[in-house]
């Protein structure tokens, strides 16, 4: 038996933490994209998107619990990731003079697999901006002032979130920021999806190539899906 | 027909001891027979250095048949050089071009301090083995060889893992300087066989924790270790180590 606290900081256990939190975040991102697809079919005055958003807002305290849980998962993923990265750096104080050259074959050594901390860190910065932009401002009430209100099916007056998204994505700056950030989501998942399963030991040699390929499909679908929204809305607005 | 002799320029890491700064020095190896092994080429360079009264380049080697795991260094950023599934003693000069500059460095990892030049101290691996990479047996009469029956597919898998010669190339090639392929191979090898089962959890726990204590990095599933491994040890052994560790969290045997 291994005490859980000991296990979670061990070289194997810490990757269990990274994997499970990573898989949870991928599942969240899939749901997030599915919900956001309403932006492609907003209906009249963005009612599809606003009703979808209102569904969550109507959850009341339950929504805050979900959001808090999500935040914990993100913080855990980042904390374990940064601590692991620092340990790894410490394990090789001096790098090779010629740099490392991959021998190819079964290796997945690439700029992407080597720089998960960089793509992940970029996503962390994106997340802060994104949460402020689309979540915190709504909580502070400034969205209502700027973009007006929307009446839900239940007759409640809420901030017109569709108008806010539409307004943001009519400006090229925000479109570029979101599209660029989603490249990093794709880069991170390209190695991360397969890596999460391998770290859990949920891998057989016969599956390895297939799951690595599925990782590429997942990375491309999620990245392109999210990129499509700002691009589509920018085209619609202009 | 290709040329029988070539000239190569060597950029070799020279370091007098663990606390020396270390630096690259250049040497020219002329008229190198392309059928020489890389180590034979260094032997010739060293003869010239000794004759000139200089300090020869220190490197490890023993069997020179690719099976003992003693030799190994990084050539042009690749552990054991450019050829797959080989140790540096089985690498031949025909793998290099005439006039090529070849950079030679020791394995670089904090747990593998440089003793001199290309020789590193791999005691960290021995300590991982000492922590649990064995089967405790009571002494007594010798058992019949086939008394403990092991199915062929299982025996093959255990043997594939047991092929690890502990050379350390996996650590050298890992961007994180992780020792997961080595430790994973040892854990897999013993956990698959009936003789290794009784100490399965204890072994995994102790070896993984020792690996951490030695200061090796953490595996991020890049797989360069498998690409440089002279014995083609698969990273499936790392996945197996993860499963064994998960099991060890909950069980004592």
Image: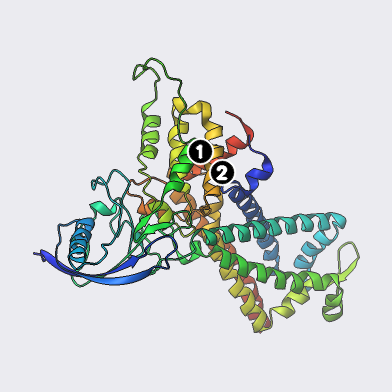
Left or right placement of residue A62 versus residue A71 in this view: right
Q: Quarter of the image containing the N terminus of chain B?
A: bottom left
Q: Is residue A201 visible?
A: no
The disc at residue B209 is 2
Callout 2: residue from which chain? B
Disc 2: CA contacts within 10 A as few (<14), some (14-19) or many (>=20) = some
Q: Position of residue A106 (x, y in %)?
A: 39, 53
Residue occupying the point 74% across, 56% down:
A72
Tag 1's secondary structure? Answer: helix
Q: Quarter of the image containing the C terminus of chain B?
A: top right
B245 vs A149: above or below:
above
Q: Are marks 2 and 1 in contact (CB under 8 Å)?
A: yes
Of marks 2 and 1, which one's residue comes earlier in the chain?
1
To the question of a shared chain for discs 2 and 1, the answer is yes
The residue furthest front is B53
Left or right placement of residue B28 versus residue B239 in this view: left
Callout 1: residue from which chain? B
- In which quarter of the view is residue A56 placed? bottom right
Residue occupying the point 83% across, 81% down:
A146
Colour setting: rainbow
Q: Position of residue A74 (x, y in %)?
A: 69, 59
Tag 2's secondary structure? Answer: helix
Alpha carbon distance from label 2 to label 1: 9 Å
Q: Position of residue B112 (x, y in %)?
A: 44, 54
Disc 1: CA contacts within 10 A as few (<14), some (14-19) or many (>=20) = some
Q: Position of residue A95 (x, y in %)?
A: 44, 66
Please name the residue that numbered disc 1 is placed on.
Answer: B131
The residue furthest left is B1
- In which quarter of the view is residue B7 placed? bottom left
């Amino acid at each position: 038996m291994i005490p859980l606290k000991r296990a979670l900081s061990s070289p194997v256990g810490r990757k269990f933490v990274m994997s499970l939190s990573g898989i949870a975040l991928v599942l969240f991102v899939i749901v997030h994209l599915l919900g956001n697809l309403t932006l492609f079919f907003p209906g009249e005055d963005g009612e599809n998107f606003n009703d979808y958003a209102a569904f969550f807002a109507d959850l009341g305290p339950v929504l805050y619990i979900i959001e808090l849980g999500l935040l914990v998962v993100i913080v855990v993923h980042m904390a374990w990731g940064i601590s692991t990265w620092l340990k790894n750096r410490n394990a090789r104080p001096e790098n090779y003079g010629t740099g490392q050259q991959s021998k190819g074959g079964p290796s997945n050594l690439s700029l992407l697999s080597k720089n998960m901390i960089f793509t992940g860190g970029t996503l962390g910065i994106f997340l802060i901006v994104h949460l402020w932009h689309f979540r915190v401002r709504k909580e502070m009430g400034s969205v209502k002032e700027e973009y007006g209100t929307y009446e839900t099916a239940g007759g409640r007056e809420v901030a017109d979130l569709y108008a806010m998204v539409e307004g943001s994505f009519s400006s090229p700056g925000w479109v570029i920021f979101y599209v660029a950030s989603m490249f990093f989501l794709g880069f991170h998942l390209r190695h991360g999806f397969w890596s999460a399963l391998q770290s859990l030991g949920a891998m057989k040699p016969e599956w390895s190539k297939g799951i690595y390929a599925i990782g590429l499909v997942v990375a491309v679908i999620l990245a392109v899906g999210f990129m499509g929204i700002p691009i589509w809305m920018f085209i619609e607005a202009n | 027909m290709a040329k029988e002799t070539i000239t190569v320029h060597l950029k070799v890491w020279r370091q007098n001891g663990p606390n020396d700064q270390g630096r690259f020095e250049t040497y020219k190896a002329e008229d190198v027979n392309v059928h020489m092994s890389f180590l034979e080429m260094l032997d010739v360079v060293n003869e010239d250095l000794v004759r000139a009264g200089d300090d020869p380049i220190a490197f490890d080697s023993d069997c020179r048949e690719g099976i003992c795991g003693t030799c190994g260094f990084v050539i042009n950023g690749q552990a054991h050089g450019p050829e797959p599934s080989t140790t540096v003693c089985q690498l031949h000069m025909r793998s290099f071009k005439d006039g090529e500059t070849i950079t030679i460095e020791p394995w670089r990892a904090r747990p593998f301090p440089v003793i001199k030049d290309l020789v590193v101290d791999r005691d960290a691996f021995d300590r991982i083995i000492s922590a649990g990479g064995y089967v405790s047996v009571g002494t007594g009469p010798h058992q019949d060889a086939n008394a403990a029956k092991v199915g062929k597919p299982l025996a093959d898998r255990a043997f594939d893992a047991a092929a690890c010669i502990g050379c350390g190339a996996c650590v050298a090639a890992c961007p994180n300087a992780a020792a997961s392929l080595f430790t994973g191979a040892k854990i897999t090898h013993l956990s698959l066989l009936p003789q290794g089962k009784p100490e399965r959890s204890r072994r995994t726990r102790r070896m993984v924790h020792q690996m951490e204590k030695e200061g090796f990095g953490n595996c991020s599933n890049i797989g360069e270790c498998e690409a440089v491994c002279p014995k083609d040890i698969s990273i499936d052994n790392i996945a197996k180590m993860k499963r064994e560790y998960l099991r060890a969290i909950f069980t004592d045997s």
